[in-house]
Amino acid sequence: MPPLIEYHCGCTSLPTGIPPPPHLASSSFAFHPLHGLYFCEECDAVRCNRCVTVEISGYYCPNCLFEVPSASVRAEKNRCARNCFECPVCTNTLQVVPSDPPEPHSGAPVTISTVGEPPFFLYCNHCRWDSFDAGVTFEKPTGLALQLQKTEDSAPEILEVEKLKDYFEPALKQAQINQQYQQALAAAATGGTTGAAGGPGNVGHSPTTSLNPIHVAASSALSREVPSFKYSGSSRRPGLGPSLAKRGPAPSLGSNVNDIDHPTKDYKPRITAGTGEGLAHDAEIEWVSKLGLPAGEENGGGAISGISFAHKNEIASLEQRLHATQYSWAPTHSLRTVDLKPTRVPLRSKKSKRCPKCTHILIKPELKAQSTKWKIKLVAANYLPSIEVVIPTLGLTNPSVKRTGKEKDATPEDAALANMMLPGKTYPFHLVFSNPLYDPINVRLSVQRSFPPPPTGSTPNTAPLDPSAAVPSRRPPYAISLPTSAFPIAAYAEAWEYEDEEDEEMPDDEELGLNLGIGSRTPGKSGSGRDGKGKAKTVGILERRANVTKVGGEVVIGKDGKGAVKFNMLVTYTYRSDDPAEDKADTSTSGTPASKLGSARKDTNSGSGATDNMKTFSFYTVVDLGMIAPKEMVAKVEKQERRESVQTVGVYN
Amino acid sequence: MAAPQAEPRRPTSMSGAGEARPRQSSSSYVVGNAPQYTATRRHSLYGTEDRIIIDPGSRFWKVGFSGEGKPRQVFLVGSRHVGHAHDEAGGGVSQLWQLEGPKTAEEREEADRMLAARLQDALRSVFFESLMTDPKSRKVIIVEHPLLPLRVKDLLAKILFDNLNIPSLSFASSSLLALIAVGRTSGLVVDSGHLETYALPISSSRPMYPLIKTTPRAGARLTQHLRALILEFGTFHPPFATLAGSANTAPRPTRIPPEILTDAIIEDIKTSCCFVGRVMSQSPSGAPDTMGIDTDMPSPRTEDRMSVDPESQPHTPLRSGPNSGTQTPVRQSQAGSSASWATRYQRDSSAVDFLVPVKPPPPLSGTGRGSIRVPGWVRERAAELLFEAGDVDEASVAEVVLQSLLKTPVDLRKDLISTIVVIGGTAMMPGFIPRLHDEIVRTLTKVTPTASVRSPKRRAYDPYEPLRALVDHVAILNDPSPVPSRARTAGSAPAFAPLCMSWVGGSIAGALKTGGQEILHDKWDEASVVIEEPETPLHGLATRENNFVLPDWTRAPLRVGAPHAGVHPPRQYGVPLDEPITV
């Protein structure tokens, strides 16, 4: 996996406001790619898809792009009610095809209708499934869903649920009346003095509150409950058995006809489990048990592949069965592929999203199904600098890649190793920042310590991630170096605008960048960097052009390092705000040099920066640099290497 | 907002449909012809809308609207986050919670965060992807498994109220809902899911929670067992190395490399080509004892498997031999535990071998797909794990049913044993329910050996002696192939799939405006307080802590004089436990 960077959304931070340490699994839920994030201007905060409030603003069919009015979505079960069907086997879209035209009889002129011959059926262009075998055919090639409506509406389980509802409803009503009456009685008897009678579980529905008829009526309207559903009702308690329960208040008032627990007649289902649908149960077991290789068959090697896979295809996989269940009228019991029925294409929705705190709209699509534009679009990519991570030396230092050209193909292990870092080595990496704002910004980076909250003020960048104060065994086997001081990124501008400025600006920037770069390096790190790559500078600003600045960092892998190299990086940037309100920047960092630098630069740039409002915004990112090669893998390749005695032994010193 | 209008507008939306339907609806609502139509119509008259029914399992979630006959969607939790490394991070298995939690406090903290994050993702996807509805206007019923961890319940409520802003939430017992789906209010519910199987008696719509009996022999254990069996007895047919070779140069079948047998493939084998055979024909007395030992099957890890496996020789000819059929004599002669096991099952199985196509990993990949040969008896007898006689810790499914019955009052037993309802995903295996019936009957009719030679009249202790008289009344309501019994209730339940039964019950309860105590959003908000967390990292998920106490059977107040069960009383309880509660 290439090195990648993700941005933090505050909704999942630890109580202290810092994101979870990157080695925890839950860290992956707190960080998101930049393109998936929104930015609320009111709250001045990043919002992610896990915290925004979602509203469905329109439904459409992804296949025919019909915009379904929201009134009919519910009744159509979130599925396209026109001609769009999905293959139950492969979920490809199905096509309506006519039957073959009749054989031309002798002499009789064949009249071929323009739409084709009925019956029509659905055909899958991908897996060649057709609905003819599943017993689904149509008289007309249009309005297919309507033609099937009747089948769907009279699906057995729907009728069954209706019947069950009708069976329970009178009894429930009776039970409710009884309960209210009892409560009224009980309340009258005790005079509302039984303090804790309801018990804590009986929130808002204790007998004492329903003293007068108004209360009884209100409670019946508000909370229609069966007494028996409650865990801790005052009169009926679970787990005591009927003999004990009967000793309490009388369970019913006279009419036992509608007593839910002692029905006069049992419920008679329409279709009983015993009769079943599709294949009978025993027959199905028989079918499954006999499906496969016949007992005597000696599969002589290759002969198996063709025939035997067909058996697998006769059984619908769980996925296919569930897909068919989601909405079609296929029997849910059946294992057989032939029992699968085509499903209507599920609708998609256009969603608008709001900030969970201030309910301002963050993103709002145009309602037309064909349109891919937005009416409102506050995406984080327009507010935060985008960052790319590159490890320039990775994939080159490892011998396997060099070897591939001349020798036989690299083993998969070699290929994997080529993208991993080796223990005990130092790797430079580049962070490429690009600024989406129309104002230049100053960026300052710092590495978040893994465990304790970072002490404010000091940002020891080249320190090992985990101080010894934390659990020693958890000490990450790598150290990250980043440029300590702030660096500028020029404003975003249209491509043609850069041409004019280029002459005057570039020398200045070059000088600035160089200074910063050298200043930020700690001697030891730069030395190792030079050793590793023979390059003068690895930590600091490497390149500036247009609105892009490339800075270098460095990671030192410990001798016995293993696992992933991941670290949380706090990015703080300062920009000039047009907004006179000053209170937005809440994160206070030691950014005075940065802001000074920024304003100075702006002065030279525009010449009108006298009354600048400098604002600071900071956000966390997680940088995943990739994996450290496991010891045994390195050893294996190394051994192979030595055996082959290729000239690149020096890499492993 | 839009939802109440949805129902009355429905006729116009399908005006082009059958001409008959609108006319019929205007005159009278004839139940039977277009029942769904009348149903939705009736709802709108009450002015309320359908609720959302969520049946959250540790793996599969069933979600949909009340009043419908099927869940809108049944999905594997966590399977939707394609491209994000969430589930790899979560331990590979897409399973929300396990039976065993992490040991250390820090790990627990982290597991808690993971659970919260995954639950949140799942719930958000239910509303915005599966059902595409606005959570702010929908009441929610959660189908609650009796053994659902309280932490999960708390998190569900927290996310639904705080993140999704639903107006009201209620929890309904999954077993009771399953009974409603079969049109009853009393019965014995057996739920065989992924993590555990339990039996819970319900009388007059009151779940008798203290009488619940449970065993970990369920889907997860079965998967583990099946993997071990396939690794041991299955064969791998690699693909051709090159396309040029003829049929004679086809690669020899080998043992299955463990890395090929991914969780997905095992799951596929389990759900599509396995089934439960009928009771084996052997003498009922001798078999269970030895089989009980064999139940401790090698775990799926290879090293364990190798160490337990007493005979590595029989497999060497397997590598050279053309198929496993010739191996039978070798296994018998070796008489190792797993070998005798294999032959015993093999003798009793009529199923044929089955080939499952697999895509081998790089070192073995040749020209395409290889295949795994699953012996027929493995397909048929893997589920024996669930039915073999168990011990104190892990009873078999049938034993769980009987033990639970033993705890119920005597006058209820007869009714309960003739109204057994079997639900859950593992019960979807073809043959599971009939086999459970047979197994219960077999356990009750088993001839117990005499205790000693000296007193031949004294029998060995039989725990199920009190239930023996009821053997004629054993009946599973949703038995798809019922055996005629005196109870005559076998197979009389509606033909809902066992997996969906609880959900369907929830759908009915939701349509009838019932289903547990409602927790309103206002109440939830009132109870929430802002706790200023001290500067302690890694402790506490968020600053806003809600001390609303969800109703739960484990939190029900104890009777007067009941012994103090735990050291920790439930926190923030309205009434202290010591105080007597007047009924």
Image (cartoon, coloured by chain):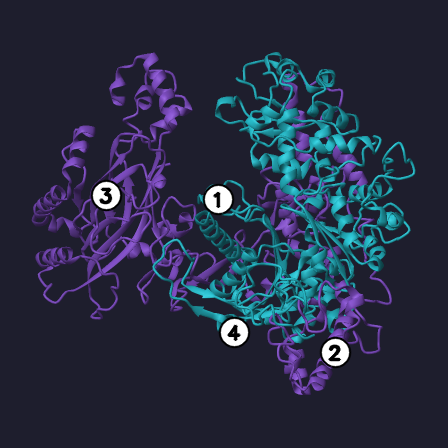
Nearest-to-viewer mark from 3 and 1:
3
What chain letter is assigned to the residue under label 2?
A
Q: Nearer the viewer, mark 4 or mark 3?
A: 3
The front one of A343 and B360 is B360
> Is residue A303 placed above or below A597 in the rendered structure?
above
Q: Earlier in the sequence, mark 4 or mark 1?
A: 1
For the residues labelled 4 and 1, say whether their Cβ atoms are less than 8 Å apart: no
Q: Is residue B72 left or right of residue A226?
A: left
Residues tagged by mark 3 and mark 1 found on one chain of the structure: no
Give the residue number, with chain letter if any, for mark 1.
B90
**How far apart are the two marked residues, 2 and 4, measured between alpha carbons?**
27 Å
SS for callout 1: loop
The answer for how far apart the CA atoms under marks 2 and 1 are is 50 Å
Q: Colour of chain B?
A: cyan
| Mark 2 Cα-neighbour bin, 10 Å: few <14, some 14–19, many ≥20 | some
Q: Secondary structure at mark 4?
A: helix
Q: Which mark is residue A177?
A: 2
Query: Mark 4 and mark 1: span between their CA atoms?
Result: 34 Å
* Subunit that carries the residue with mark 3: A
